[in-house]
Every structure is written in C-alpha cells, then in structure tokens.
C-alpha cells in the first residue's frame, strides 16, 4: 500500500479518547496551483469504480484471500499489521465497507488496530463513502472521522478541504480538549496539505474563519519548519501575538531536532513569552539526547509555565538512565509545579530501583516534591505490603492528596485481606465517613481506580 497510513489510536470504535500517529509515507495527490484557485476549481473526484489500485501485488492478493480473523491469529504484531495493510490495499470501497461490518466481532485491541488501517485506506480511495459509513456508527463515528479526514487530506487535500468547509457539522467536536481526534479538522488538513504544497495550504488556511485560521496557519508553519525553518520563522513573524508564540514554539521544536545550535541562536533574537516558549520547546528536544546539557540551559528560562514544562521534559528523559540524579536535580529547582516533574521521575525510578525511590522519599522534607513522589510511588508499587504503603500514604501533607492515597491503598488491601483492611478503615481518623463507605462497599468496580488522583497520571 503506497499511500499514507494514519494510525490514530483514538479508540475509534470503542469510545476511548486521544490518539497518536504512526507513519506517513507520502502519496500522489493531484496538484493545486494555489489555495484560492484550488477552492474555486477543485479537482474532480474520480468515480468509485476507478479508485481501487489498478494492480494488486502478489502479497496483497494472498492477504486478500485470508480473513481478518486469520490475520489476527498470526504470530507477531508487525506481521499482522503488514498483512492487514496488504489485505485492505487490494480491496475496493464496497469490499472495505463489508470488512468494516466485521469489526465489532473483534476483541477491543484487534478492533482498534484493524479499524484505523481500514478507515485510512478507505479514505484514500472513497473518502465520502467512508464518511457516510461513519455516520451510522454512533459514538464510534466521532472517533473514525479524524482518521478519515486526515487520510483523505494526505492524498487529496483540495477536495478534503472543500468537503470540510461545506460540511462543518460533520466534524463538530473534533479538536484538542473539545472531543475525540486530537487536532481540529482544519489543523489536520492544513498539516497534511503543507507536506505536499505549503503555499497552497497557507493560502487556504488564511482564508478560514477566525476560529480556525490561527490553528491551521500554525500547523502549516510547523510542517514547513521541518524543511525550511528560516522561511517558517519569517511567516510566523507576521502572526498575531498568541498565534505567533505557538508558531515560534513549533519552529523551535522542529529546528532543534536537526540543528540545535542554529535553533538556539535564532531563539536569542526573540523576546518575551515567544522566546520563553521557543526555548522551552528546544530544551525539551535536547533532553532526548543529552538531558544534562538540557538541564544546564534551564537557568535561561524565566519562572513560569515554559520553565516548568522544560523541567518536566528534562526530568522525564534524565530519569530513564539516572533517576536518582534526575530526582535530586528536580528537588533543587525553583519551580511553581515540581510535582509534575517528580511524578515523571518516580514513574521510571520505581520500576528500576524501588528501594532507592523509597529512600529518596524518606529523605525529603514535607512539601509538594515529597507528596507527589509518594503518590507516584504508591501508584506504581502495586505489590508492596499494604500496611507499609498505608503508613507511607499517611505522611502526605496535603489533606486531599493524603485522603486519596490512603483510600486507593486501602481499597487495594480490601481485595487482598478484607478483614485487616476493614479494621484499618473503620478505625482511621484520616478518612471521612463518605470515603470509608466507598472503600468498604468493595463493589468490585476496580477499587483503587476511584482514588487514582494525580499520582496515577
């Protein structure tokens, strides 16, 4: 299959949220002279009967002769993935619709894997058919549409954009923090279009309404920054303050991946919040390869969200190889939110050296670092002695966090030794009556999930 495959693990058919993308291997869309001319004279959609690949490889033919159930029983996740790609590559739109009807019969994890591949392929050869099918999927259709739209835009952004602007209600709810799918539809199209023709993508993005324009333009600039950061920076300089800061952050991240020194030099020409955000993003990238070098640049950041974010990114990467060093560094930083960073560290540390993680907690004075580290330790240490874990939970200084951690640990104990846990809960002075009732109900709904809190994030 030679078109892009968008793997948006947004739990397409099972109601999960969020997602991430695996792979983009290019495509062969029809070119557009510009964003405006493209919208005035959109490329004509090919008839459905002509959209299937003219020739199917031997491997695709072999895969097509097998059922989805057979493929899912094949050893090796990579082999299953390739077999599904091959099978769907050899199908026309009607066959894909028939296969989509079989998805509900698969276990959840298999259903997600198959559905994202199926709808990605379907969108490349018959996007409107795939969208029409998604309308009858209920809630699942809300999670399918971002994958369909992105895959369509990856091969035919002109018509994807035209359909999107003419049918906005079909994509309502898409967007970061506003519903399934992650990015807003305009962002998805703009990003994919920019990979093929950044000038046309930018022209289209600039013609959108005020609500969508900024996000779409920033997406184009972000994509352009991967190949031409200087040009991207020049375009970002023309944006309003809020969009400009976001665009500069995207440019800094992309530029730092290929040439950190050049990105850092450019960042020094900026000022204000834009500079802080860009530097934070660049430091986050540097942390992937050299967390200690990244840590040395934290002092260049002013107190605030950008600095806290950079500390979190550095701590997370550093703790993969040296959690003790990362934890000590975080504890020495002046930050408004040390808890997020130390939680990242403890997540790695407990799995590597449980005793060392506990010793760090015990060495810390009362405060947010200790509280956050303790919550993460308790969340990760599922096999620890419940009585010892409860004693540790009781040392958390924040009343709400302490009650949550105690409740989580006691609920877990209820499943291991109900009599001992019940005696503890009934005599506890740290739990209110409502919390005691929730724990003692032991209704089998997962117990500690009800008390997850920040430590489990």
Image: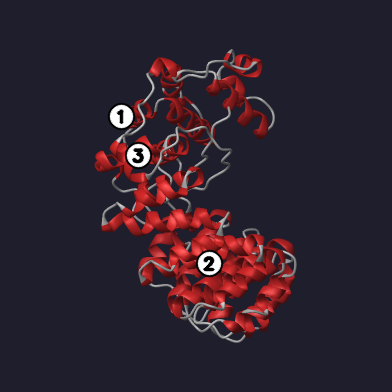
Mark 3 near mark 1, Cβ–Cβ under 8 Å?
no
- Of residue 372 and residue 78, the one placed in the foreground of this image is 78
Q: Quadrant of residue 341?
A: bottom right
Closer to the eye: label 3 or 1: 3
Residue 39 visible in rendering: yes
Give the Cα separation between the discs numbered 3 and 1: 31 Å
Question: What secondary structure is found at the residue carrying circle 3?
Answer: helix
Residue 455 tag number: 2
Give the Cα separation between the discs numbered 2 and 3: 50 Å
Closer to the eye: label 2 or 3: 3
Question: What secondary structure is found at the residue carrying circle 1?
Answer: loop
- Whichever of labels 3 and 1 marks the residue nearer the N terminus, that label is 3
Residue named by callout 1: 136
Q: Quadrant of residue 417?
A: bottom right
Residue named by callout 3: 38
Residue 67 tag number: none
- Counting other residues with Cα less than 10 Å from the Cα at mark 2, is it few (<14), some (14-19), or many (20 or more)? many
């Amino acid at each position: 299959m030679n078109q892009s495959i968008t793997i948006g693990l947004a739990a397409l058919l099972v109601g999960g949220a969020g997602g991430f993308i695996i792979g983009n291997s290019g495509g062969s869309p029809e070119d557009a002279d510009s964003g405006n001319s493209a919208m005035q004279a959109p490329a004509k959609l090919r008839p459905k009967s002509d959209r299937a690949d003219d020739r199917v490889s031997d491997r695709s033919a072999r895969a097509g002769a097998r059922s989805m159930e057979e493929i899912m029983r094949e050893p090796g996740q990579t082999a299953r993935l390739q077999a599904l790609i091959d099978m769907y590559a050899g199908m026309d739109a009607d066959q894909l619709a028939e296969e989509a009807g079989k998805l509900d019969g698969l276990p959840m994890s298999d259903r997600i894997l198959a559905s994202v591949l199926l709808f990605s392929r379907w969108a490349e050869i018959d996007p409107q058919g795939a969208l029409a099918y998604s309308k009858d999927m209920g809630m699942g259709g809300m999670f399918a549409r971002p994958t369909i739209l992105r895959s369509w835009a990856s091969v035919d952004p002109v018509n994807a954009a035209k359909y999107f602007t003419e049918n906005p209600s079909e994509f309502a709810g898409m967007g970061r923090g506003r519903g399934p799918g992650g990015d807003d539809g305009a962002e998805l199209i703009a990003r994919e279009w920019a990979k093929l023709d950044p000038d046309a993508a930018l022209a289209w993005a600039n013609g959108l309404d005020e609500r969508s324009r900024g996000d779409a333009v920033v997406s184009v600039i972000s994509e352009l920054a991967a190949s031409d950061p200087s040009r991207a920076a020049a375009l970002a300089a023309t944006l309003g303050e809020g969009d400009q800061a976001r665009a500069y952050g995207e440019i800094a991240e992309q530029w730092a991946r290929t040439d950190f020194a050049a990105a850092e030099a450019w960042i020094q020409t900026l000022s204000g919040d834009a500079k802080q955000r860009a530097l934070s993003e660049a430091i986050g990238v540097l942390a992937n390869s050299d967390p200690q070098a990244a840590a040395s640049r934290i002092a260049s950041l002013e107190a605030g969200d950008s600095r806290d974010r950079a500390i979190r990114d550095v701590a997370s990467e550093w703790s993969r190889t040296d959690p003790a060093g990362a934890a000590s560094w975080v504890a020495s930083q002046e930050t408004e939110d040390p808890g997020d960073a130390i939680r990242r560290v403890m997540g790695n540390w407990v799995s590597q050296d449980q005793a060392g993680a506990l010793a760090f907690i015990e060495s810390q004075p009362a405060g947010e670092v200790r509280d956050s580290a303790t919550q993460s330790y308790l969340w990760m240490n599922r096999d620890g002695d419940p009585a010892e874990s409860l004693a540790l939970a009781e040392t958390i200084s924040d009343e709400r966090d302490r009650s949550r951690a105690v409740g989580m640990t006691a609920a877990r104990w209820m499943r291991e030794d109900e009599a001992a846990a019940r005696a503890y809960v009934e005599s506890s002075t740290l739990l209110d009556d409502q919390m005691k009732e929730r724990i003692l109900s032991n209704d089998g709904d997962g117990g500690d999930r009800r008390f997850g809190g920040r430590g489990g994030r």
